[in-house]
Image (cartoon, helix red, strand yellow):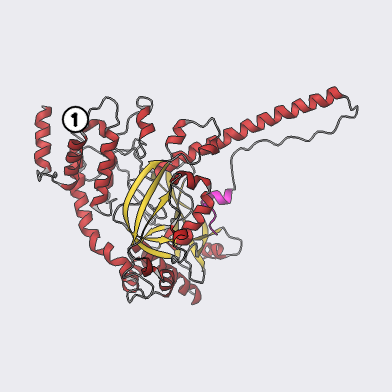
């Protein structure tokens, strides 16, 4: 349990890639002459040098690729199941077991990413911490990390080093109504997972997130609630001899440029309290759905200037059941359930269950785990409407010449210093794209991105900017008014007149 992830396709194909060639063993010289022995010794030393160079080159190549992937998870314009990107105000569940496993697997890299003065992980500070603790994200800070540089050797490229980003997330425990013994928590497994959480209510702690092939240990509360209900339904179906539930899981492709959806069925659900990697999935062969390229801020994928609908040239992220197609045949299901079929143990929140059970699961989660679902339901509609209006305003900002340098990230060759200095290379187009797609769970998270944009703008070469004035302008584009109450339309009109 807790092994690093490989997609079903790559797991079936086996590990690929070159590796240092093996040296052939030589028989000892029959003549026993010192000259022949010296020649053989020199040959072995040369072979060892070649092998060492090949090993360093391979490690450096893999490390550079990992650094590139690490940046992308923070620069998406849409969400992907199994990859949590924190936003201030999020209501999440902190999963102790997952954090413990991730710290073990990350090893020295996690320590380096967190910094030498990083506090100990919460499961060491609070030994009696339950397996699941409801929290609120109070602050998110992204920073460049030095972790992992040693893996690439002394010749590691600085460009690879600067792309390693981590998120420092401050959490406040909010378990007054979400302890295992609370009246609103009526699912037995959730009662056991959350038992004792109230004792930590109000406490604060910090965790560090990095890109990882392991499941998230921070999960949105409403998604966590639905996933537990899904898992319970899957277990009930198997116990009753009914057909297994269809599921899909998403993996990022090997090059980090696309998302791949794999379809499977639930073979088993692990009994006991822990839900971590508790669902056994049998994969259905040859069922792979590939999404559009990952929409990160440094890929060149942008949006139209009007920003009215967030259109980006007809490209849209592929959901787990978009273009669903035909259901798998009985033979395919039987093959996925057979012993020896390709399979994996996954955590319930990594899975997308079929649309035919989605509505019923959401209703059951609201009934059985109300404290974990109430806030998301109350805020969703309002936030979505506000984001669409903000997307239109930011689209107008993209047409202003004064903000043109912020529309996209600078060329790395022309402004290398900028790329070394910034932790998250966010641009104005990505902000508009996120608003148009409803990426932000609260408008406060969009304003936090505005602060990142302003800090990045102040580091641009040949771009003189008043940080306070820029922050006021971009905040008005997102909120509709600046801090002094002036509406965005008035500010935009004044700037257009000034630009002639």
Q: How far across and down, in percent of the image, does residue 35 sit? A: 84, 22
Percent from the top left, x then y, of residue 99? Answer: 47, 57
The residue lying toward the viewer, choosing from 425 and 335, is: 425
**Does the stretch in magenta take in 4?**
yes
Residue 490 quadrant: top left
Q: Residue at x 47, y 49 (%)?
A: 212
Seen from the viewer's position, the closer of residues 482 and 54 is: 482
Look at the picture and state if 199 lies above or below 444: below
Q: Quadrant of the C terminus?
A: top left
Residue 309 is left or right of residue 135, and the answer is left
Q: Position of residue 93 (x, y in %)?
A: 38, 62
Q: Nearer the viewer, residue 447 or 250?
A: 447
Does residue 97 lie above or below 427 as drawn? below
Residue 351 appearing in the image: no
Residue 27: x %, y % from top left: 84, 34
Q: Is residue 487 left or right of residue 120?
A: left
Secondary structure at badge 1 equals helix
Residue at 47% from the left image edge and 72% from the top image edge: 235
Q: Residue at x 44, y 32 (%)?
A: 159
- Residue corresponding to mark 1: 401
Q: Which residues are magenta?
A: 1-13
| Residue 165 visible in the shown view | yes
Q: Is residue 327 magenta?
A: no
Q: Tell me which residue sits at (88%, 24%) in the image.
A: 33
Vertical order, 293 against 319 (above or below): above
> How many badges with numbers are in the image?
1
Q: Quadrant of the N terminus?
A: bottom right
Picture quadrant where residue 352 is located: bottom left
Quadrant of the image occupied by residue 26: top right
């Amino acid at each position: 349990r807790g092994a690093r992830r490989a997609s079903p396709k790559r797991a079936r194909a086996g590990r690929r890639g070159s590796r240092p060639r093996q040296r052939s063993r030589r028989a000892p010289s029959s003549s026993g002459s010192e000259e022949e022995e010296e020649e053989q010794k020199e040959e072995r030393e040369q072979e060892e040098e070649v092998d060492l160079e090949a090993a360093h080159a391979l490690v450096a190549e893999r490390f550079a690729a990992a650094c590139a992937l690490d940046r992308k998870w923070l620069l998406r314009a849409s969400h992907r199941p199994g990859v949590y990107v924190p936003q201030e105000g999020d209501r999440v569940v902190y999963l102790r077991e997952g954090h413990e496993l991730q710290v073990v697997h990350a090893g020295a890299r996690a320590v380096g990413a967190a910094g030498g003065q990083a506090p100990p992980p919460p499961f060491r500070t609070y030994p009696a911490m339950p397996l699941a603790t409801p929290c609120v994200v109070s602050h998110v800070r992204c920073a460049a990390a030095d972790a992992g540089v040693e893996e690439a050797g002394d010749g590691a490229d600085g460009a690879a080093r600067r792309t390693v980003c981590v998120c420092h997330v401050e959490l406040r425990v909010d378990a007054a109504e979400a302890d295992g013994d609370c009246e609103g928590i009526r699912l037995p497994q959730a009662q056991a997972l959350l038992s004792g959480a109230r004792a930590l209510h109000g406490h604060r702690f910090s965790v560090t997130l990095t890109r990882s092939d392991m499941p998230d240990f921070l999960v949105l509360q409403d998604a966590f609630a639905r996933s537990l209900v899904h898992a319970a339904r899957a277990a009930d179906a198997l116990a009753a001899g009914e057909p297994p539930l269809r599921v899909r899981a998403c993996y990022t492709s090997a090059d980090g440029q696309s998302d791949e959806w794999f379809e499977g069925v639930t073979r088993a659900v692990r009994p006991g309290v822990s839900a971590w990697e508790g669902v056994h999935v049998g994969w259905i062969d040859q069922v792979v759905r590939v999404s559009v390229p990952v929409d990160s801020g440094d890929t060149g994928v942008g949006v139209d200037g009007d920003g009215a609908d967030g259109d980006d040239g007809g490209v849209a992220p592929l959901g787990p059941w978009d273009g669903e197609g035909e259901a798998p045949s009985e033979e395919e299901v039987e093959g996925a359930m057979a012993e020896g079929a390709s399979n994996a143990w996954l955590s319930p929140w990594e899975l997308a269950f079929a649309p035919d059970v989605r509505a019923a699961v959401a209703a059951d989660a609201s009934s059985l785990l109300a404290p974990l679902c109430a806030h998301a339901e109350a805020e969703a509609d309002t936030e979505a409407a506000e984001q669409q209006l903000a997307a239109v305003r930011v689209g107008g900002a993209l047409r202003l010449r004064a903000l043109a340098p912020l529309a996209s990230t600078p060329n790395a060759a022309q402004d290398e210093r900028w790329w070394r200095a910034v932790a998250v290379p966010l641009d104005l187009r990505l902000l508009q794209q996120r608003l148009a797609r409803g990426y932000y769970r609260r408008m406060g998270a969009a304003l936090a991105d505005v602060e990142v944009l302003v800090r990045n703008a102040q580091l641009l070469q040949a771009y003189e900017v008043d940080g306070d004035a820029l922050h006021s302008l971009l905040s008005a584009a997102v909120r509709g008014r600046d801090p002094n109450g002036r509406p965005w339309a008035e500010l935009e009109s004044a700037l257009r007149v000034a630009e002639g």
